[in-house]
Amino acid sequence: MKLHNYLIRLQTTIESRQEIDTSKLLILQPTRDRGAIRARLRFYDRSFLELSEELEVIGDEVAKLHYSYHYQKGDRLIFRYDNAPHHPELSTFPHHKHVGDRVEPCQEPDLQDVLREIDAWLYSRPAQP
C-alpha cells in the first residue's frame, strides 16, 4: 500500500465518524516514503483520543516507526498503545498497552481497532461523570 493511500484511509476513517469532534488533524508527507499523522479526537462524553503515527515505506509496506494512541477521560488514562522501547520484558516488545497502571503485551493496533475499542468502552458502560 502506498503511503498516500494509507494516510487517506486514516483521514477518511476519522472524518467518517461524524459523532467525533476532530479538534486537530495534521497529515504530513514530506517525501513519497515518509509521513506522519497526528490528531486529537473528542467523544460525546468529553473523553479524547490523541493519536500519532510516524510512517515510512519499507519495501512494499507502510511501517509505523513510532505510534501512540492515547485515550483518556479527564485526568484518567483509559488506555494507551505505543511502541516506545521501554518494556523489553514483554513478549511483544516494543509494542505494548497501558491500561490504568498496568502494562500489557499487545500487537501493533490499527486506528480502526482503537476506535472499535473506544466504542465498546463508551457504549457498553453506564454513563460516567
Image (tube, rainbow, N blue to C red):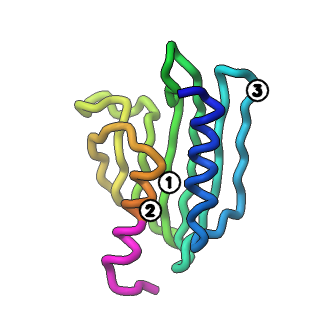
Q: Mark 3 against mark 2, which lies toward the viewer?
A: 3
Please state if 119 lies on the left or on the right of 28 as rendered.
Answer: left
Q: Please name the residue that numbered disc 2 is placed on.
A: 77
> Quarter of the image holding residue 122?
bottom left
Q: Position of residue 49 (x, y in %)?
A: 54, 59
Mark 1 or 3 closer to N-term?
A: 3
Q: Mark 2 against mark 1, which lies toward the viewer?
A: 1
Q: Position of residue 19 (x, y in %)?
A: 57, 73
Which amino acid, mark 2? Answer: Leu
CA separation, marks 1 and 3? 25 Å
> Quarter of the image holding residue 78?
bottom left
Mark 2 or 1 closer to N-term?
A: 1
Q: How many other residues sit within 10 Å of disc 2, few (<14), some (14-19) or many (≥20)?
A: some
Q: Please name the residue that numbered disc 1 is placed on.
A: 70
CA separation, marks 3 and 2? 32 Å
Nearest the viewer among 85 and 57 is 57
Q: Is residue 18 magenta?
A: no
Q: Are marks 2 and 1 in contact (CB under 8 Å)?
A: yes
Which amino acid, mark 3? Answer: Pro
Count how many numbered circles sit on residues in the image.
3
- The extreme right residue here reads 30
Magenta residues (range): 119-129
Query: In the image, which disc is placed on residue 30?
Result: 3
Nearest the viewer among 66 and 111 is 111
CA separation, marks 2 and 1? 8 Å
Q: Position of residue 81 (x, y in %)?
A: 42, 46
Q: Judging from the image, what secondary structure is the residue with disc 2 in?
A: strand
Q: Judging from the image, what secondary structure is the residue with disc 1 in?
A: strand
Query: Relative to 75, is 112 above or below?
Result: above
Mark 3 or 2 closer to N-term?
A: 3
Query: In the image, which disc is placed on residue 20?
Result: none
